[in-house]
Image (cartoon, grey):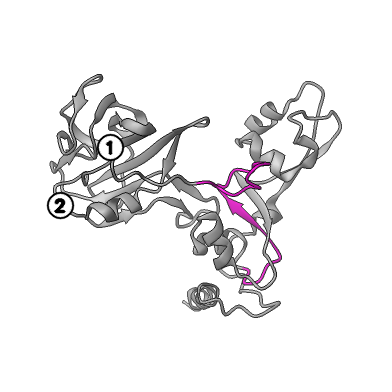
């Protein structure tokens, strides 16, 4: 109980911007900072930037952001590079700012940023999970805005409680953050699931952890996904209208401790493929 109290106090200081210079949070209950878990890798003959990234289950951009020697796209033989424990970028905390300011800039949860960096309240350099390094954007994740003229309907018959939100979070008992690409909306088994906008069904079948999944492509490069469905009411190639029933809430896919729900995603097309966006702005408009 004392550990939880100390950790809660430290998080409270962080979120309220009250951290004092040099103040460190207690180590109890906090994971080792991500930057303290960086490993070193010496490039061998035959290795490439892509092969090294695959070996460590990372994307090449993460290694390029951590190592200037890789930013040409090539991996020089004999070069020693730094490999972080998961995807993200290293960033300095600007003078006079807090982790809360940095979290807002990069659109990550402040509590996640706090825990990933070992519960330090005033670090100089931090690791920000899930942000893709780019020489153009200087690592800042660019998020498109949902177009209200394309997606016009709430995906359930009535407004619902969000059981698990969009974004990075640290599961209980783990030290590696997980990205949740949509929102889990509480709903009873059998509840009708509706298309969020006019479009064409691109996928309607069982797909691994997503269970029964419906994917709808909309105009202006938007896509919505509806997962963990029970029954499917549409088929691939079918044209659907906004508000049309496309399936029912079920419990297929990976079992969840959150109870029955609809997993709903909004994605936009880009040169990186279909990129998940935060559905909350859309959901707030449709409530």
Would you call the spot at circle 2 few (<14 residues within 10 Å), some (14-19), or many (20 or more)? few
Vertical placement of residue 75 versus 160, above or below: above
* Image spot of residue 213 (x, y percent): 28, 31
* Image spot of residue 184 (x, y percent): 30, 49
The disc at residue 248 is none
Q: Is residue 139 magenta?
A: yes
Q: Which residue is mark 1?
A: 226
Q: Which one is in front, 286 or 236?
A: 286
Most common SS among magenta residues: loop
The disc at residue 158 is 2
* Image spot of residue 223 (x, y percent): 34, 34
Q: CA distance from mark 2 to mark 1?
A: 16 Å
Q: Secondary structure at mark 2?
A: loop
Vertical placement of residue 226 versus 84, above or below: above
**Residue sitting at 65 percent across and 38 percent down?**
61
Left or right, 285 with reference to 67: left
Left or right, 142 with reference to 260: right
| Camera sees residue 30 | no
Tell me which label, 2 or 1, sits earlier in the chain.
2
Left or right, 49 with reference to 154: right
User: Which stretch is magenta?
Assistant: 120-142
| Camera sees residue 200 | yes
Left or right, 47 with reference to 268: right
**Residue sitting at 71 percent across and 29 percent down?**
49
């Amino acid at each position: 109980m004392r550990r939880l109290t100390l950790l809660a106090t430290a998080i409270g200081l962080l979120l309220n911007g009250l951290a004092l210079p040099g103040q460190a949070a207690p180590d109890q209950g906090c994971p080792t900072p991500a930057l303290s878990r960086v490993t070193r890798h010496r490039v061998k003959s035959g290795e490439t930037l892509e092969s090294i990234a695959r070996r460590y289950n990372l994307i090449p951009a993460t290694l390029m952001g951590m190592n200037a020697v890789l930013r040409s796209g090539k991996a020089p033989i004999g070069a020693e590079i730094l490999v972080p424990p998961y995807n993200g970028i290293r960033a300095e905390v600007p003078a006079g700012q807090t982790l809360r300011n940095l979290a807002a800039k990069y659109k990550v949860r402040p509590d996640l940023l706090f825990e990933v960096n070992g519960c330090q309240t005033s670090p100089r350099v931090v690791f920000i999970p899930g942000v893709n390094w780019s020489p153009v954007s200087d690592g800042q994740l660019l998020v498109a805005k949902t177009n209200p003229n394309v997606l016009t309907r709430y995906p359930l018959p009535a407004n619902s409680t969000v059981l698990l939100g969009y974004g990075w979070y640290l599961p209980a008992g783990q030290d590696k953050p997980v990205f949740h690409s949509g929102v889990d909306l509480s709903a009873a088994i059998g509840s009708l699931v509706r298309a969020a906008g006019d479009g064409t069904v691109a996928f309607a079948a069982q797909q691994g952890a997503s269970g029964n999944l419906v994917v709808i492509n909309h105009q202006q490069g938007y896509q919505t996904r509806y997962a963990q469905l029970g029954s499917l009411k549409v088929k691939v190639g079918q044209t659907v209208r906004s508000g049309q029933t496309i399936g029912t809430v079920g419990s297929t896919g990976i079992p969840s401790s959150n109870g029955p729900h609809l997993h709903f995603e909004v994605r936009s097309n880009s040169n990186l493929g279909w990129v998940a966006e935060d559905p909350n702005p859309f959901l707030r408009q449709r409530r």
